[in-house]
Image (cartoon, rainbow, N blue to C red):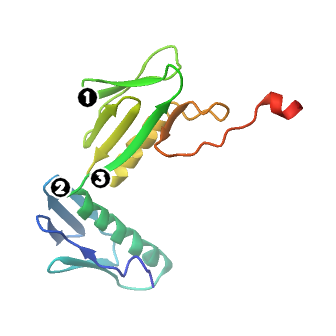
Amino acid sequence: MSKIGTKSVEVEDGVQVSVANGLVSVQGPKGNLTVAIPLHISVKQDGSTLMIERSHESKKVRSLHGLIRSLVSNAVIGVTKPWEKHLEVVGTGYRVKMKGRDLVFEVGYSHPVEFAEVEGVTYTVDGSKVTVSGIDKQLVGEVAHKIKIIRKPDPYKGKGVRYEGEVIHLKPGKKAKTA
């Protein structure tokens, strides 16, 4: 039995959920999201709770059971309280600023790197910290990762773009190896 798939999803006040034709549509104060439901998985609504059930016990259906429950839960949470990822720019001379709705990074290249706005995601900049937020958890994580790979953290000095609180294990370098 899937431990995650058997848990019910609680729907908060102000959120409307409709299940039809293999789609779960979630509407809330922050926006609308839709989750596609594969074959052999069903979603049943009972008042303010949603139950995700599977029709048989094949390995593929069992693996999808918990996944679909998590996707529906993330959609229900996202339309009331947006998901956020926090990044920080670390390094001497490294900076980030807003240019309209786009981000501009100066991270040691010969030119500034512009990161265009993605629909459904908003950015805020506070000094050297960037907050990526939106209602779709998957999209927020994907955009945060694309921002991070503009300049991955250097393994020797730790300079670059990283998630807030991420620990970078620094390599010792040539001098430490010969000593």
Q: Amino acid at mark 1?
A: Arg
Mark number, residue 136 = 3
Mark number, residue 101 = 1
- Vertical arrangement, residue 179 with respect to residue 112, above or below: below
Name the residue located 17 percent from the left edge and 55 percent from the top edge: 32
- Vertical arrangement, residue 130 with respect to residue 5, above or below: above
Name the residue located 72 percent from the left edge and 37 percent from the top edge: 171
Q: Amino acid at mark 2?
A: Asn
- Left or right: 8, with 92 as reference point: left
Q: Is residue 55 visible?
A: yes
- Left or right: 123, with 20 as reference point: right
Q: Is residue 118 visible?
A: no
Mark 3 and mark 2 in contact (Cβ < 8 Å)? no
- Left or right: 15, with 90 as reference point: left
Name the residue located 30 percent from the left edge and 36 percent from the top edge: 123
Secondary structure of the residue carrying numbered label 1: loop
The answer to which of 56 and 97 lies nearer the viewer is: 97
**Tag 1 or tag 3, which sits nearer the N-term?**
1
Residue that badge 2 annotates: 32
Q: Quadrant of residue 34?
A: bottom left
Callout 3: few (<14), some (14-19), or many (20+) C-alpha neighbours within 10 Å?
Answer: many
Callout 2: few (<14), some (14-19), or many (20+) C-alpha neighbours within 10 Å?
Answer: some
Q: Nearer the viewer, mark 2 or mark 1?
A: 1
In the rendered image, residue 116, in percent from the top left (x then y), is placed at 33, 29
The span from disc 2 to disc 1 (Cα, nearest Å) is: 22 Å
The span from disc 3 to disc 1 (Cα, nearest Å) is: 19 Å
